[in-house]
Amino acid sequence: MTLLDMREITKVYPGVRANDNVSFSLNQGEVHALVGENGAGKTTLMKILYGLQKPDSGMICLKGKAISIKNPRDAINHGIGMVHQHFMLVPPFTVLENIILGKETHRAGVLRMEEPAKEAEKIMQKNGLIVDLNERVEDIPVGLQQRVEILKILYRGAEILVFDEPTAVLTPQEVDELFKTLKKMKKQGKGIIFISHKLDEVLAIADRITVIRRGKVVKTLKCEEATKPLIAELMVGKPVFMEVEKKPSSPGKVILRIKNLSRTSERGHKVLTDINLTVREGEIYGIAGVEGNGQSELVQAIAEHVKLESGEILIEEENILDWDVRTRRENGMGHIPEDRHKYGLLLPFTLADNLVLGQHHRPPFVKGFQIVDTPEIRKFARATIQSYDIRVPSELTPANALSGGNQQKAIVAREMRFEPKLLLAAQPTRGVDVGATEFIYKQLTTARDKGKAVLLVSADLDEILTLSDRIGVIFKGKIIKEFTQAEATREEIGLYMTGEQESA
Amino acid sequence: MKRCIIFLLALLLALSFFSCKPKEKAVEVKEPEVPDYKVGIVFDIGGKGDKSFNDSAYAGLVTTAREYKGYIKDDPDKVDFGKNIELKYLEPKPGGQDREILLRVLAEDGYNLVIGVGFMFTDSLGKVAKEFPNVHFGLIDGWIPDLNESSNITCLGFAEHEGSFLTGAVAGLMNKGGKVGFIGGMDIPLIHKFHGGFYAGAMYVNPELRKEGMLLGQYCGKDPSAFNDPKTAESIAVNMYKQGATIVYHAAGGSGTGLFKAAKDMNKISIGVDSDQGFTYATAESAEEREIAEHILTSMLKRVDNAVFLTAKELIDTGKNTGGYRAFGLADGGVGYAVNEFNKKKLADITDQLEKIKQKIISGEIVVPDDDAKVKDWAAKTF
Amino acid sequence: MLKLKIDKYRLYELLSPIIGFLAAIIVLLIIVIVVGESPAKAVSAVFKFTMSTTARLATVFSIAIPLFFAGLAVALAFRAGVFNIGAEGQYFIGGLVGAMAGIYLRLPAFIHIPVVVLFSMIGGALWALIPAILKVTKGIHEVITTIMFNNIALALVNYLVNEPLSGRGTSSLEAQTHEIRKTALFGKLNNLFRAIGWNVPDHVYLDYSLIVAILMGILVWFLLFRMRYGFEIRSVGTSLDVSHYAGIRVKHIQIGAFLISGALAGLVGSQEIFAIRGFYTFEIASGLGFEGIAIALIGRNSPLGVVFSAILFAFLKQAGYGLQLYTSVPNAVIYVITGLMIIFIVVINEIMTRYIRALRKKEAG
């Protein structure tokens, strides 16, 4: 039976048709995946469904009846729930408190906890979503937090569940758990909308797959007829080759050497313990691990001038601990930061300015008495835009007008153009569409083949496996295992990532 | 965006509506009668309603309006006796920094005579006067050097020694066997004028006080802050009362509140200066201040109203003002002592005597010394 | 296509202070009606007093000069993400330092005037130094330190002018320094304007400070948009993290911007000290440092924008005097009106800006 029917939805923002006559339906007991590049219109469609945006035309039918959704409250009342990419949880509250938040049971204003607890228990059993209700959310791992998010929605009686990139923050094992849950919910007759970039996952879980490109539905496929290259082609509009052609690596001398590095956070927690690793010329060293196990802190220690508890960081056997960021950069360190908006781009600045950022203080970009040589910068930017295929109307377009993929391309281009000896790439393809991902992979391997040392940090295990020559697994601030590419398998690395093989 | 544009249009429409109106009106309003003279005043801090110089100056405007069929422009009290003379007052910001701007505003707008109320206008008035040679400026109670008859500034001063002679006489007459004291603000010649007049007045009416050591005098300091130092004034006053003074007179500006506090605390008598300070306190909001009023017998008055009126009169009668220095004394009602509903009774017994002394000064029978250093010679000559 | 769109938003952005201004005028009219004065009279009073004659228009520009310095100072700090509320204290100190150079140095005029300008700037910069260092090294928020430094500056200046630097005998009671040497005084440019047919009367102060203002405006623009240092200032103000990652020495930039801001603030009092009064006093106009914040805000922290918003503020100030001179609106109400007008312009400008930003975002996403 058709649970949800969104018919001919059109939403026009000034100058852009974000959704152009989009129709999308969802049956009971079905997982319907929604895929498309960033900016294709998935988010807009879901925002319309959840009452965050008003469509210009089109209608939404629930079980055959037209409804209007003016705000999220309406959506919830109609049994529509959304698991956001960024969890909407109150960290210091307990799991139970988070679950009942917004639908509290009370008697004369006094909160009742027993009945909700019982009901939550029931939902947990039914869906295989086991969490300790009395733990504080801030104390439980991300995978469990996501369960809380799902429980929250089920507690409100949702029939339709929207999952926005749910696997981005999960380990392979956690993804498996999530999929089990999804299947259980499917059996209960709930409808699930699954938004993801990861085509493997989409193929593993979805019954139907709808591909959106530039605000239009390109095609809705049955799972059986879908293949990875087909979906990718539909998304991008041209054939895509996901497999990276890679020559065998021929590592040279050691560029980056980290010795016994330990670091304590400002709050006094130990975040890195005794890290030892080397990255050589012409190799990609990938760091695998569940997010929050010290990856960010490690990259920060290499890229920035921060306080360490002990240890050394050497570049070409020279200790760099006393160098500030500028000195490190001037001595051949490139850095693709993990959050491009927060660390990578000056959003209101032009693309040209962003492309020289970090080198802007050196000739040829300044001349005379520290005067910015704008024509030179623009010339450089035009060349870079062309050779790195950044799609913008002009080099003077502000960075915030670029799509996510093009923004990331710009950062990669910037860091590569200056031929660094060492390239730190943290989550280089996060939130980036297939086309840009392919491009970035190519760039990273090119860098390697040119003899650069690349340190890759990614939460996407496939990415690590695809690109790395050597892999280190980080868990709780320690590198607990190193693999060569040949000996690495998904499953084994997954076990190390969750710490189950820590003792080994 | 459409909404935005509509909003914008609505605003423009509204504005054009308002901006059309004045144009039509401007034609009608165009002053039907052009006044013969325009006199402007810039009050000092406190503005209208300060119960002091500003109010007194305002009274001068009202008198002028009445005598010459004039009106005070934009005044809420609607003082309007005719259109011959236009009178206008402006008030500075609470900090008083825009005194100069306001003087300029009036001068620029075609006022024939512009008066600044109070010595704080000294610097700014001197400067603005240079910029507007065709406007005459009056400076109340201030002093600008090197002026002559053809200058476009007149310093409207007061014969403070004459007024102080009368308050000295009040002190002398009311004093019962004790001493009499004087507290000056900054130690400058101007304040010594008060000092001399006061001593002479006290000695004139009370032979007891002609003896050595019966008159006490002290200054708060040697820099301008002495005019705003109630603490020092209070300790001087307490000291004087302890030494046997029954009445103390001050010419110390803001420091005077110290004297009043001491008088209240020790249940003694004080005399105020410049404006009717007893009246100001008696009509104050707080009960504490009204209590202080009981201890202020009278005040030496500078009749700013008369100074304003007489200066305006000169302009209207003769068509111009004489520059230089003009001191308003007892003869033209420029100084006096304060009598109000609160202290009338206390002074009733001596009013006649004071009036006689006043006449003697006006007639020249008594020549008041204008410095305490001259009092000794004066006494030797007089007694 | 995309470029065209951006220009459209630019236009909206430029319109927003104008809409704010119109709304403010309506507020003015409403209040005027409430206190029982004719709105037509009020409008004509404002008009007559601000632009009916060359002299009055020139006066608006004259008043705008110190406001421009204040706005420019705050704007430059804003550009680096630093909130300089201390312009107030910086110009009191800067003015005093400049005046000292004007009083105690013996130099020919063509050197003396640049020297007093420089000293004023150094004074202002020095007064910004400690809050800047405290912010960067100890993380003490500049809003707190600069406010405290404003009070300290006022107290210090009050003491200095009354005691060690006092230059007044007994004739005047206002505490002030000695007269500034003739060689250091700012002459008027009125003759120059007359030569080009603009008849500015003598009582209007369009003096050398106007030249200094224009010069500073151009310099700041050049610094911000043509020099590497300015690029880094804007970068730091846009994103500390990005700048840090790009190897920009964020702390140096913030201290530097703070000092430049202080130096510009040091010039706020220069017109009054070197052109109008000719000596330094505690009585020079206060509060301009705070007005500078609003001016910078409306001017969008750009030198050209600050020119316009400083003139707008000068216009409002003059409008207040116009109301006092030509209408019966009580003085206290006039303060309320000018205050409200400023708030209206700032708030509406801000709301519009956000609305435009949201529109733009919608379009982009």
Image: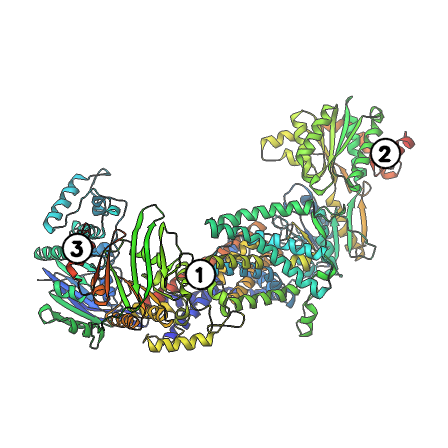
Q: Is residue A244 visible?
A: yes
Q: Which is closer to the viewer, label 1 or label 3?
A: 3
Q: Which is closer to the viewer, label 2 or label 3?
A: 3
Secondary structure type for disc 2: helix
Q: Chain of mark 1?
A: C
Spatial CA distance of label 1 from label 3 is 42 Å
* Residue at mark 1 shares a chain with residue at mark 3: no
Tell me the number on the disc at residue C236: 1
Q: In the rendered view, does A323 fall on the left or right side of A476?
A: right
Tell me the number on the disc at residue A495: 3
The answer to whether the residues at label 2 and label 1 have Cβ atoms under 8 Å apart is no
**Relative to residue A107, is residue C148 depicted above or below?**
below
Residue highlighted by disc 2: B375
Image location of residue A339, percent across then percent down? 32, 61
Q: Nearer the viewer, residue A443 or B30?
A: A443
Secondary structure type for disc 1: helix
Which quadrant would the N terminus of chain C be assigned to in this image? Answer: bottom left
Q: Quadrant of residue B331?
A: top right
Which quadrant would the C terminus of chain C be assigned to in this image? Answer: bottom left
The answer to whether the residues at label 1 and label 3 have Cβ atoms under 8 Å apart is no
Q: Amino acid at mark 2?
A: Val
Q: Quadrant of residue A200?
A: bottom left
Q: Which is closer to the viewer, label 2 or label 1?
A: 1
* Residue at mark 2 shares a chain with residue at mark 1: no
